[in-house]
Structure formats: structure tokens, C-alpha cells
Image (spheres, rainbow, N blue to C red):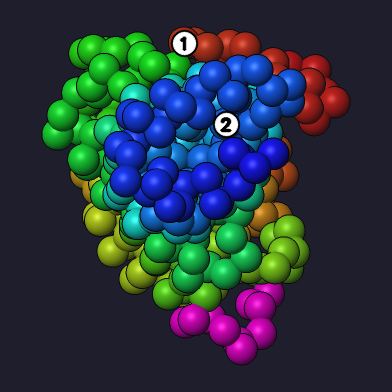
Amino acid sequence: PFWASPICFLGAAASLSDEALLAALAPKLDATAGASHARLAAEALAVGRRGLAARLLEKEEDATRRVPLLLQMGEERLALTSAVAHGDAELIYLLLLHLKARLPSALFFELLQPHPAAQRLLIHFCRQQDTKTLREFLYHADQPLEAASLAAAEGYRAEALSQRTRGLALARQFYEVAAARAPLGVAASLSFSPAGDTGASHHAALMAHATGEQLRLLTAQLNLERETAGAPPPPAAAALAPGRWRFVDLPLNETLFRCFVYGQAPYAERLRLELRVPERRWWRIKVRGLAQLRDWPALWLFHNSARRPPLSAAAFAEAAIANGAPAEAARYAPRMPPAEAVPLLLQCGEASAARAIALANKDKNPELLRRVSAHLGAAP
């Protein structure tokens, strides 16, 4: 109709205030079936009547018509409020994508703050399509724990090891931020963690430390890959499971063990100190590594390097037997209790030495002599 065209805002109507013109148009809009306030608002906006356009949009019931025009007017906050109130997920998704592309991240996240429903839709979308934006949003929403977990997971999914390193470094930064403060109330609205969780800071501190250690291990593994690149695998590596990498993706214990196999024992020593490997665990790893190398003199010296070794002589003997060196294993028998030495010597084919120990202890432990005799197939 004539009154719904741009001409109705010109001539004498141009001198009317927004309120007066709206009052004149309202009865016509109400009386006309299918009349669109949004269409008339668009005509008002086209002739520069922005205030009137805004007043007309307030009366528009169809959010799919109202929201695009609000965006055209630069009213992003009103557009988002309108879309959320309408409850149409598809409309909200489209609006979020538009705002994300149009606004700086900080302003975009600020617009979302009063709208948990829109936040949840953004999170759902970004988990599938845009983890970078999700990470930024979580941090802006005072959720550094979630941002840290996302950064670590994203790093480990990356093909390039440099991206994995960056992901872990970023995750550690987020964990350190989280450790410095407790989560705020926004956590409750996003359903990530209980608001006011007093254990969150302690958990974040632990995760920051663990992530830092993992980052140091990965850095060490990359260095070891470079150190051993191009060199043929040593004979001791023949029994190891083949893989894309020699060190990357291995746990700490296996990394230290492979240092010995690939001739990187000094690096293993440095890594042990840097990552504070417990002494008993370190001894087990080194014994296993030296035995895998069949470096029997070094293994013997290691056993004698401590006045009170954290491992018994039996552990050294077992490592030698596991690597096909029974004669080397038998060397440790004199340093073992008779009840352990006799079975070891029998296993190593040293029946005469086992019998000698059994005879020397026949009063205290007659079972040893019977065991030797049974092994030899003769009567006691």
C-alpha cells in the first residue's frame, strides 16, 4: 500500500516526529493483514529515519525479519538479545557466525556474556569447527582450565611436532593462570566445573607442573631424534618394536631405556636429573638398558658403584639371564642369600657351585641340598 512505501516518509510526513509518524502509521499496520513492521522499518531506514525504524522493529514479532535489520543498523547487542529470546537455534547460529566474522574477538565475547544459551551454541559449534576461537572464548570467559585442556588436546592431534610443542606450551600457560585464581561464577552457567571449587587452583597447579614435565620430555625426545637421525639402529635395538619415531611418543621410562640402547647414556643421566626420576626406578631402567646392550663390564661396575645399591644382586642377575648371558648372571650369586643363589646357579648351569653353597648351608637350610640333588637327578 501507499502508506508502506518510502514516499510516506517524505513531504509533510518528513516534518513529523518519530512518535507522531508512528502513531499515524500504527492503526494502518494493525488493520492490514500480513503487514510487516520490519518492511516498513527498512523503508524508514532507507530515508534516514533510524529512530523510527528502531521503534517499528520493537513491534515486529518475527525475529527472522527483525534480526537482519538490527544488524544492518549496527545494533548487534539488540540483534543477539532478540535472537536468543526467539529461541531459534539456527537463527542464533547464523547470527553468531556473522558477529564472529564482523567483530573483534573481545567485543564478540563481551556480547555473549549475558547469554548462556548463545555461549553453549558457540562452544558446540567451535568444538567441531574452530578450536582456536573456542580456546580464546574459554579464556575470556575465565575458564583457563578448559582452555588448557583444549590446547593440550589440540596439540596432540596436530601432525607436526612443532604444533604439539606449541599446544603444550600454551596449555601450561593456561594452567598457570588457573592456578593463580579460583574459577568465577561464569563456570556455573557454562556447566564446566562447580562455581567456587576450592580445589581448582590446586588441580591447576598440578596440571601446570605435569604439562611442563611433558613439554620437557617432548623437547628431549625431539633432540634425541635429531641426535640419532640417519644412524643405523644398533644391534641392541633389533628387539624393539618398530615405529615412526625412535623416542617421540614414548613414556619417560622407555625414553631413558632407549637412550642406553642408542648410545645416549649421558643424555639419559641429564634427563634423569631434570625430571627427578626416583633412584630405585632409575636403577631398574639403567640395569635393563646395560643388559640390553650386553655391556657386562658396565653392568658390573654399576652394581658396585653404590655402597648399598637400591636393587639387589638378583635384579642384575635376572637382567643378564633375560638377555641370554647366564655366565654373567652367575657372577652375582656370591652377593645373594643362599636361598636365592642356589636356584640362580642351577638356572645358569652352574650345578657344582650351587652344590657347594647348598653343602655349606645344609644345617641351616637342608632344602637347598635336596633341591640341588633333585636337579641333578640323584639322591641326596
Q: Residues within 10 Å of mark 2 (few under 14, many from 20)?
A: many
Residue 115 horizontal side relative to residue 277, left or right: right
* Quadrant placement of the N terminus: top right
Looking at the image, the residue that sits furthest to the left is 180
Q: Main secondary structure of the magenta part?
A: loop
- Which residues lie in the magenta part? 226-235
Which residue corresponds to mark 1?
364
Whichever of callouts 1 and 2 sits on the residue coming sooner in the sequence is 2
Residue occupying the point 61% across, 89% down: 230
For label 1, the SS is: loop
The verdict on residue 330 being magenta is: no
As shown in the figure, which amino acid type bears the numbered disc 1? Lys
Residue 366 sits above or below residue 76 on the image: above
- Which of these two is toward me, 174 or 278? 174
- Could you say where residue 182 lies in the image, as x and y percent from the top left? 19, 23
- Could you say where residue 238 lies in the image, as x and y percent from the top left? 73, 68
Which residue corresponds to mark 2?
37
